[in-house]
Amino acid sequence: MTDQKIKKLVIAALLTAMTCIATMIIKIPTPTFGYIHLGDGFVLLCGIILGPGAGALSAGIGSMFSDIFSGYVSWAPATFLIKALTAASAGLLFRRTARRTAKISSSVNRFAGVIIGGIVGEAIMVLGYFLYEASLAAFGSGSFTKASLAAGIVSSATGIPFNAVQGVSGIIIAALLLPILCNITEIRVWMNNTTGKESRT
């Protein structure tokens, strides 16, 4: 394994841990038995920094373990999938946006990439949890019928505003932290390669 791959593996592990910690450290319970947290900022950063593939795994694993450690074990599988998709879509769109705006300054095209990738990624998060909560509510009623599904949809809809707030906070956190993280040489080089800029080490 090359030094570059080792460095990327270490940073991936750190982002996984930070995703887990940021999700657990501040938790604001919601009426839908979930909670608002700061972890989505790191979920987005996983996809943006590591790319859609590795970023999805890092975000999914970190978020899943936060659920397990916090007593939300029944949510862990869904969280892994939803956060992985959030990070993957954010990472993919960040790269496409950054390449299309490569002639603009690095700070501007990175910011644009975070916003566009973040909006789509967090929309996936909101939709994913809405569908999962609706399914849980429907099955929790004892029988999966049209009536129980309708009731589940109505009850899970109350969680959409809370998840939306969490998503917006995640985008803001990612936009604020990315310029700081780009001071790390390896991350700056990855970002420059992504945006088509020449790296300065």
Image: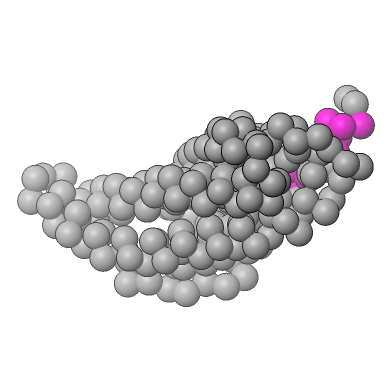
Q: How many marks?
A: 0
Task: Tell me which corner region of the image, top left, top right, bottom left or bottom right, holds residue 30.
Answer: bottom left
Judged from this view, the residue extending furthest toward the top is: 1
Q: What secondary structure is the magenta-colored segment mainly? A: helix
- 6 up-or-down from 72: above or below: above
Judged from this view, the residue extending furthest toward the front is: 103
- 77 up-or-down from 158: above or below: above
Task: Tell me which corner region of the image, top left, top right, bottom left or bottom right, holds residue 19.
Answer: bottom right
- 29 up-or-down from 80: above or below: below
- Residue at image position (63%, 50%) is 108
Image x and y of residue 137, in percent: 24, 55
Image x and y of residue 146, in percent: 9, 45
Q: Which quadrant of the rendered structure holds the N terminus?
A: top right
Image x and y of residue 143, in percent: 15, 47
Residue stretch rendered in magenta on the structure: 3-13
- Residue at image position (19%, 54%) is 153
- One can see residue 86 in this view: yes
Q: Is residue 61 left or right of residue 4?
A: left
Image x and y of residue 167, in percent: 46, 59
Q: Is residue 40 left or right of residue 129?
A: right
In the image, 69 versus 183, the foreground residue is 183
- Residue at image position (77%, 51%) is 182
- Residue at image position (51%, 44%) is 117
Q: Is residue 74 left or right of residue 64?
A: left
- 94 up-or-down from 180: above or below: above
Is 39 in the magenta?
no
- One can see residue 17 in this view: no
Is 12 in the magenta?
yes
